[in-house]
Image (cartoon, coloured by chain):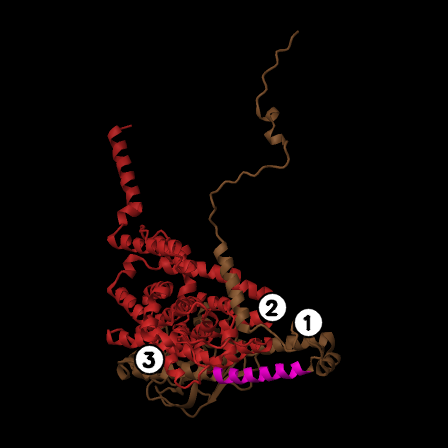
Chain colours: A red, B brown
Amino acid sequence: MDINSLFVFLGENLSQFFSYTSFSHLTIGHIIMMGWGLLFLYLAIRHEFEPMLLVPIGFGILIGNIPFMAGLKIGIYEEGSVLNILYFGVVQGIYPPLIFLGIGAMTDFSALISNPKLMLIGAAAQLGIFGAYMVALVLGFMPSEAAAIGIIGGADGPTAIFLSSRLAPHLMGAVAISAYSYMALVPVIQPPVMKLLTSRRERLIRMRAPRAVSHLEKVMFPIIGLLLTCLIVPSGLPLLGMLFFGNLLKESGVTRRLAETARGPLIDIVTILIGLTVGASTQATTFLTFDSVRIFLLGAASFVVATFGGVMFVKIFNLFLKEGNKINPLIGNAGVSAVPDSARVSQVIGLQYDKTNHLLMHAMGPNVAGVIGSAVAAGILLGFLS
Amino acid sequence: MISIAQRIFNACLGRFGRQALAALAVAGLWLPAAQGQRTTDFRLNEFMVLNQTNYEDDFGERSSWIEVFNTSYGTVDIGGCYLSDDPANLKKYPIPKGDVLTSIKPRQHVIFWADNKPTHGTFHLNFRIDDTRFLVLTSSDGRTIIDSVTYPEQTPDVSYGRTEDGVGAWHFCERTTPSTNNSLVQLEAASDRFKTYDPLGIAMTITAMSVVFLALILLFIIFKNVGKTALWVIAFRGRKIPKESPAQATVSGEKQQPSAGAVFAAIAYALRRYELEMSELESNVLTINKVAKAYSPWSSKIYTLRERPNKKSK
């Protein structure tokens, strides 16, 4: 055997092996995205910012940004790969309604039923969606793209994924990451706006304790809610239908096993799949664009506008309410559908000014109304622009 | 307690009756749902009888053609249906089953050639329509007519079709449009339309916010009244309760129920405590408790020390 040719062969083999490794394909973009993934993991694990979402997304970003030789059927955008098959649920909008089913099965609408006027706060806070929509149009995005960006202001990850997968699939990664990032940052974004817009006297408003809600009312809510909202906005049916169905499973009292599956294993499985695949879809080559930066900025602005809309609506609404029936404007921020984070923010800020004024239950009303409101808003945008 | 109405209902139906009713209800739900992908969604859409200088088939031949349109939003297989020009013989040409090409995509067209050359393929009929004035598409049962048309005398190279795909009146088409839409209106994309007429998004914002408010205001109105009714029912039932439970009675005889807010606060507090106390972290503090039982074989030196080998004496 010729020793020289053996070394040449060995060298070629090693060179070929190196071309297979990720190092030979690594770019600065991949490193930046991996940094993002690690930041998400840090925020989730160290600071417990939405860990259920940020851990799968953060890890998904790492998975999606390990470069590889194309054609091996391993990438999320390569047809037939495992990740691509899992991503199908995102692209076709299958996962978001399933998540809504789980959310419905775990949401108690009692706070809303006992004080129905809080529903209007959930409507007012949708201003964030349309504020961002208008700004996005001014920045040159097409209406369908602007709608996908604006829905970030609804503070609802599944809704954002659902709408962007329909209207602007090419922006879905950036929209989803932006929505989940700002949902995790609700405790950081909302308090300054809330404090800025309210006076000390308003922050000390004590609200009436909510009345007890009967079983019949709880059963009627999802049925009437579905018929009413979906007859007005049928395009919101996948989200609203599943949300109210999940809630009926919970409240009917006769489908305990189904409700437990919907709010337990089912939502957990779908959360894992949606988080991981959305994270993995942010490959540096498709994600690191100037548009993504603009989407991030617009997302932050939409959260601020949504908080503004909710708080200001309560202040105006209070002008028409009698003393004793007034609403603490600190629950206005909870009109976005980041459940229960924004309600928790209301509670925390409320306690800063009055240690005995617990706003959590009151804030849960607009918070769950925000879920309905953002799904209705998504349905309207889908109806008009698809 | 079972109401009188329920008792009558149960007595009338019995167990099997209730099951049958449930099955009927399920079937009732299924039927309209299944409508989306049925062969009844097909429509005769356009045809040309005297094709002299118009559309050619794959063999380069000109003959009469018939366009069928799938009006549904799901893929439907036309295989198994029948095409005919004879009202007395609806099953004149059975469209072959099993050909992948007979699966017609949503809102798409398919062309059949009335050239009496069925050996040319699935879409070549076994009759000509030069001397008839009637066309019919029949379902796979051979009896149910899906669509039919009786037409006037035809002009060479002018097709006869519906004004709009699947719907609309029949007329002589100004333009022949085989395998494409009959009304060639350039539909502007919704997004483009909004870009043109609402560049700042003001109209969209006003419309959408109004609809969101409308939906939630309606819910508000309904549940405000439902709440009032519920309170009235509770109050009405309360009057019927003969005795107060000891927990609800006070010395003065007034009811003393914890307010709903207090209950919620207590639950929230308990949950918070639970969350705070629940941790996956170990404390890392080793605690050696004195074992009450003084002797254990695990601590016995007999078992833990190696026995020295005994030197057996002979």
Give the SS element for disc 3.
helix
Seen in the image, is A243 located left or right of residue B309? Answer: left
Q: Name the residue under label 3.
A: B190
Please tell me whether mark 3 or mark 1 is closer to you in this view.
1
Residue at (42%, 74%) from the top-left corner? Answer: A370
Q: Could you classify mark 1 by the number of other residues whose Cα lies within 10 Å: few (under 14), some (14-19), or many (20 or more)?
A: few
The chain identifier of the residue carrying mark 1 reads B
Q: Nearer the viewer, residue B107 or B172?
A: B107
The image quadrant of residue B19 is: bottom right
Please tell me whether mark 2 or mark 1 is closer to you in this view.
1
Q: Nearer the viewer, residue A166 or B97?
A: A166
Give the SS element for disc 2.
loop
Residue at (43%, 92%) from the top-left corner? Answer: B152
**Identity of the residue furthest to the top in this view:** B314
Q: Name the residue under label 2.
A: A255
Residue at (34%, 84%) from the top-left corner? Answer: B206
Q: Tell me whether marks 2 and 1 sit on the same chain.
A: no
Marks 2/3: CA–CA distance: 42 Å
Amino acid type, mark 2: Thr
Please tell me whether mark 2 or mark 3 is closer to you in this view.
2
Quadrant placement of the N terminus of chain B: bottom right
Magenta segment boundaries in residue numbering:
B219-239
Q: Name the mark on residue A96.
A: none
Q: Position of residue A88 (x, y in %)?
A: 42, 62
Q: Where is residue B65 in the image (x, y as percent from the top left)?
A: 41, 81
**Identity of the residue furthest to the bottom in this view:** B152
